[in-house]
Amino acid sequence: MSIFLLFFVAFSLGKELKVPAQNATDHVTSEPGSQPSSSVYDTFQSLPEEPIQLVRPDPDHHKLLEVVSENVRHLHYITSSVAVVAVVGKYHSGKSFLLNQLMGKGERGFSIGPTVRPQTMGIWMWGKPLVMKNKDEETVAIIYLDTEGFAASNISEVYDAKIFAVATILSSYLIYNSVKIIDQGDIDYLDLLARRTRLFALRSQITKSKWFDEFNHDLLQFPPLVWVVQDFVQSTEGEESPQRWLHKIMSTSSRETEEHNINLLSMFESVDCHTLFLPATKKSLLQDLSQAKEEDLTEEYKEERDSLLKLINLNLKPKIKNGKSITGPELASLLEILVAAANKGSLAEVPSRWNAFLEQMHLNSVNDCILFYESEVNVLLRKHNYGAVNATELASWHDRCLKKAQELLDKLLLGLMNTTLKGQERLLKAAGEKFEKIEDMNEKKIELRCSEVQRQTELKVEASLDSLSFPIKGKDLQLILDKKKEIHIEIYKEEVHSLSDHSSYQRHLNQLLVGIERIFNGVKLKNSEAMEVILKAAIVTAINKFKESSLNINDIPRTSTGLQSVIGTSEAAADQIFKEESEMASGEEVYAAYQGYYKSELSKAVEHLREENEVLVGKTCREKGAELIGLFTEATSPKRLSFPVNESYLEQRLKEEKDNVFESYNAAMANFEDMQIFVTVKREISNKMEEISAQRQDQNYQAYIKEVEIPLKTAKKLIKLSSDKYDTVFSLRQHMEQVCLLNLDEGKASNWPRPLKLSIINRYINNEKDLRDLLVSKEGVWSSIKGFIQWLYSFIDVLINGPEL
């Protein structure tokens, strides 16, 4: 028995530790520091603006890695410091799209596939690095790496580990990409890859002979990690930050046992988290993001993308070796070292936490029974073309296959009681783990199938509505939509009827209902917009009809009654046009708002018509007013009145002429007397006649002055000679009046009325600068007091003796 067991142990371990015969370094032709001919590239700027594959799978695919030497040579032309940003994650999770967004390449960057088939093989770089200045003003070339996705079909964990290890150690900044959420599987797988890479980094020192100085541990340090969750639409608990959310998940996921302790936070220099909203809302773009342009992206996505780019730029540092930044040639050498080390088995020897059941006893019988179990399970999976299977049917099939495998193991280990028990335990555990994966994968397939049918059904709904011609009456449109909904819900149910007992079925049915409602809302919006187009056109046509009906061709002013009649007729015509033109939209939700808008526009048109008519009426009134002002001016001219004349006579004549003007204006404009403009123009005429009347009074005064000019000048001389005798303004002014009166009494004005003469004298004193200056010279506090007393005596004298005649 011991020999039998040792044979199987040795045989199993021999298979597990077998090293591939072909070494990846056989494919490396360029040595570190070698330079291509200057005719290939003259400068760093001549590097190609396209993806370049640096590492590819071997021809057998996903066993060994190969350095693409002709492409790695491009790195030798980057003589400045380099910083590497790499994106890793599961296949078809949007890594290439994310990189294109970070580089600002949009649809012109790395290839993006619309199907579930992986697009990126190996490791690719963007040919022409981006350039930035660090805080020390050092030029740094930023190299972006796109990597093959993890967990793809028929790809081993060892191969994933190789890709992850090379990308991680090359990176200055590592982005782990996932979609929608962070689950336990993601954390476990990243933990596995990180632990393998940690051990690989230590074992890779055996290749240090390719370096010209001592091996530097800086190059094997883990970079900062940011976990990017794309298509993230949920909200974190208590609106905590994505970083706290990730740390909380990692903390709650930590498992401390004697065998392991998941602690990703301690492996990387730092661990951050950043979420990105859906990049687009159109289903066609979400299915193929290579068609999405910058303007197609959602505002939330662009804001969060720009925030991520800012985070990377703030934390990005060049790769360091011995305290100095490495350049492109040194990075090329490091890449070759890492690929060679990965191919030599450093990763393959690291035990997987998920394959912990492979201990020291690897019995072929158990392995054979496990293979038998897998083949039997595959019978059902092949029957369903490896698609989604009803969960109950799959569980029942698992039980049957496991029972057969257990019966087979009993026969293979017949008589080995202890070994049989251990073997059964191992088989049960292995089958349980495999079924757990199959079940988990089937859950994902069920989810994917229901999700795919949901999306396809929504696309069918959209396609079925493309032929609709808008606008459609709201009630009629609702009948159409209800029928479409009924038909396509049945289509969904028929497509996934075998999965109807699964929660994904009902969840995606609910999501389909929401999606159809969203599509219907879009259709209703289009229909509403079409209704609005009709209503807007109806408003324009109706308002134009009002303007046409109310047009004043000859610009003849209308009376209030006539204008109101035109307005009434024109409004009725406009209302009829609006009613006819907007009949399709009548009864719709938008109708009331646009009807109100139409009434508002019609009111504006009516007001404009009133304003135009008021302008015409005002023009007519002002023309008549100008004519009457002319007659008033002629009738009160100095030639007609022969100035100077008695002031009371002048005032009487002016009043009579004003009354004549008003009478004529009222008679001529009687049709418009109920309009405000009539009153306004009448006021303007009155103001103008007041100006002319003031001119006539002044002209009459000037005529009087001319008659008595000589006596007044004589009086002025006498006043100037005797002004020193008077020390107050009051006494001096009384003196001036008395001297002027004495001189006027001896001339033509001797018989003029005393009030007329005093009026002429006062105007003369006020208009003569010399006399005004004399009065000003007598001003002062004492003069004012004394003058007031003199005035008071004079006033008392008048009260006692009466005014002087």
Image (cartoon, rainbow, N blue to C red):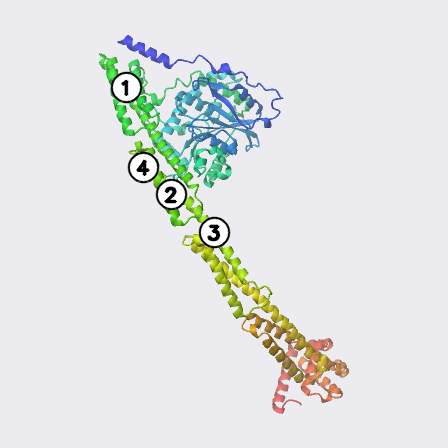
| Residue 779 in view in this figure | no
Residue 252, image x, y percentages: 34, 32
Task: Decide which of tag 2 and tag 4 comes sooner along the chain.
Answer: 4
Determine whether, in the image, residue 184 is placed left or right of residue 139: left
Residue carrying label 1: 427
Density class for disc 3 (Cα within 10 Å; few <14, some 14-19, many ≥20) is some
**Residue sitting nearer the eye, 722 or 79:** 79
Q: Classify mark 2: helix, strand or loop.
A: helix
Q: Is mark 3 in CB contact (under 8 Å) with mark 2? A: no
Task: Decide which of tag 2 and tag 1 comes sooner along the chain.
Answer: 1
Residue 207, image x, y percentages: 48, 16
| Residue 241 in view in this figure | yes
Residue 224, image x, y percentages: 46, 30
Q: Classify mark 4: helix, strand or loop.
A: helix
User: Which quarter of the image is occupied by the N terminus?
Assistant: top left
Residue carrying label 4: 506
Density class for disc 1 (Cα within 10 Å; few <14, some 14-19, many ≥20) is many
Q: Amino acid at mark 3?
A: Ile
Gap in Å between the C-alphas at discs 2 and 1?
A: 50 Å
